[in-house]
Amino acid sequence: MSHTSRPAIEMAGIGKRFGATEALRGLDLTVPAGTVCGLLGPNGAGKTTAVRVLATLVAPDRGTARVAGHDVVREAEEVRRAIGLAGQHAALDEGITGRDNLHLFGRMHRLGARRARARADELLTRFGLAEAGDRLVRTYSGGMRRRLDLIASLVTSPPVLFLDEPTTGLDPRSRQEIWGTVKELAAGGTTVLLTTQYLDEADRLADDIVVVDHGAAIATGPPDRLKAAIGSQVSVTLATAEQLAATAVVLSALSGNDAQVDVAERTVTVLTAPGASVLLPSLVRELDGAGVVAEDVAVRAPSLDDVFLALTGRPRESADSTGSAGSTGSAELGRAA
């Protein structure tokens, strides 16, 4: 994939405080044009504030930010014309049809009646909603509403798109549909900044990932590189809980890291050092030598959950709730395309 020389999104030393709370502490972010960047972090890490700064909804206290080559403070109007934004909650009128929703957004952006109608038809056909276009939105499934909300952000063909947790609450099939839409947009040259609580989503979609914690970027890079930097995970499940301690000793000695014990699941896990390899035969021999009877032994490549745990000190489940915290909210954002 080729990209233009100027990044589509740039943040340098961005700071933002709300009263006593310092939401951003010198955040740096660079997103090449035509790529998908996954912005990850615990609730309260600063993800939403970063998106709001880039969407010109709040002004930074310090630092500089540019979107599509325009400064978010000095050239806010130009930035708004260059972006689309879909928040966690769909900003649709459920009492009218999908086609009329898109037509309405087009008229709001001064496309003119004829161009707005043509753009609505074009988007409905492109993203597989043509047959549903004349149905009331209240009859749509959750996945169809999210797709319609997403493509409403594309009425003006923005080169940069912000997606705030676009698949929260959707079933697996609907999530796959949204993923396909995002991939198609990126393939067509749209730059996408994606915040998500689903790490597998970021792993599948993002060219690069930025992990944010306490208002600053603590890790940046392609998903595979971030995963490779923390080593593999070794997991042993036991027949009885009595041998958990002995197993932890073996795994800690083998890896050089502290093993984690899950008494309820009778499982011991440990992360190996980056670049180190643990072969199953040698691991089984070590366990046999210690008299450990294992039901299952596995060595697997790390996931983004493991990266999240290693970087933030807590698993994603405890860091990001399934609530709406961190959502920008389409209604409040007013469809900043």
Image (cartoon, grey):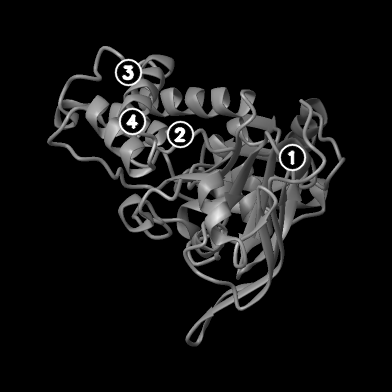
Q: Which residue is mark 2?
A: 154
Q: Is residue 294 visible?
A: no
Q: Which residue is mark 3?
A: 129
* Percent of width and height locating residue 171: 33, 30
Q: Secondary structure at mark 2?
A: loop
Alpha carbon distance from label 1 to label 4: 29 Å
For the residues bearing labels 1 and 4, Cβ distance under 8 angstroms? no
For the residues bearing labels 4 and 3, Cβ distance under 8 angstroms? yes
Q: Amino acid at mark 2?
A: Leu
Alpha carbon distance from label 1 to label 3: 33 Å
**Disc 4 or 3, which lies upstream in sequence?**
3
Q: Could you classify mark 3 by the number of other residues whose Cα lies within 10 Å: few (under 14), some (14-19), or many (20 or more)?
A: some
Q: In the rendered view, would you say 124 is above or below 315?
A: above
Q: Amino acid at mark 3?
A: Leu
* Percent of width and height locating residue 124: 35, 20
Q: Secondary structure at mark 3?
A: loop
Quadrant of residue 294 within the rendered picture: top right
Mark 1, mark 2: which one is toward the viewer? 2
Residue 222 is marked as 1
Alpha carbon distance from label 4 to label 2: 10 Å
Q: Could you classify mark 4 by the number of other residues whose Cα lies within 10 Å: few (under 14), some (14-19), or many (20 or more)?
A: many
